[in-house]
Image (tube, rainbow, N blue to C red):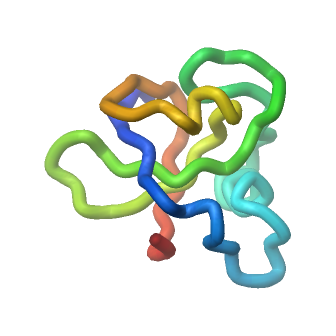
Amino acid sequence: MHYLVRNLEDTSDLKPDPPYESWKEFWEDKTQMKADKCSHCKCKENIVGAHVEMAFGDNNYYIIPLCKKCNKFTGDFFVETKLVRTNKK
């Protein structure tokens, strides 16, 4: 599915609850998919589990796979992936 999202700021210090070592691992476990490409630009390098929110009408926070470059975007952008809801911000 396609979603219009924006990156959340100041989330680099947040860690997922055990047993997860990273947000990428958290996303992979919850979706049963491999986070092997960026949800925005589709590159396959430096993929992380990124904190995002929907651009419109949703007050929830989500984890998605993004490359480090796209994880620094400001403003709204489209992604194609499954969003995994988290309560950590």
Instruction: Please give left or right for residue 53 compared with residue 73 in the image.
Output: left
Q: Quadrant of residue 11?
A: bottom right
Residue at left offset 69%, top offset 35%? 68
Residue at left offset 59%, top offset 48%? 50
Q: Quadrant of residue 4?
A: top left
Residue at left offset 47%, top offset 27%? 79
The answer to which of 77 and 26 lies nearer the viewer is 77
In the picture shown, does residue 82 fall above or below 87?
A: above
In the picture shown, does residue 9 fall above or below 67?
A: below
Residue at left offset 78%, top offset 83%? 18
Image label count:
0
Q: Quadrant of residue 2?
A: top left
Image coordinates of residue 33 in percent, x first then y, are 75, 43
Image coordinates of residue 48 in percent, x first then y, are 73, 44
In the picture shown, does residue 54 fall above or below 2?
A: below
Question: Which residue of the protein is positioned furthest toward the bottom in this rendering?
Answer: 18
Instruction: Please give left or right for residue 50 compared with residue 74 in the image.
Output: right
Image coordinates of residue 24 in percent, x first then y, are 74, 52
Image coordinates of residue 14 in percent, x first then y, are 62, 72
Instruction: Please give left or right for residue 56 compared with residue 65 in the image.
Output: left
Classify the position of the N terminus by image quarter.
Answer: top left
Instruction: Please give left or right for residue 74 compared with residue 33 in the image.
Output: left
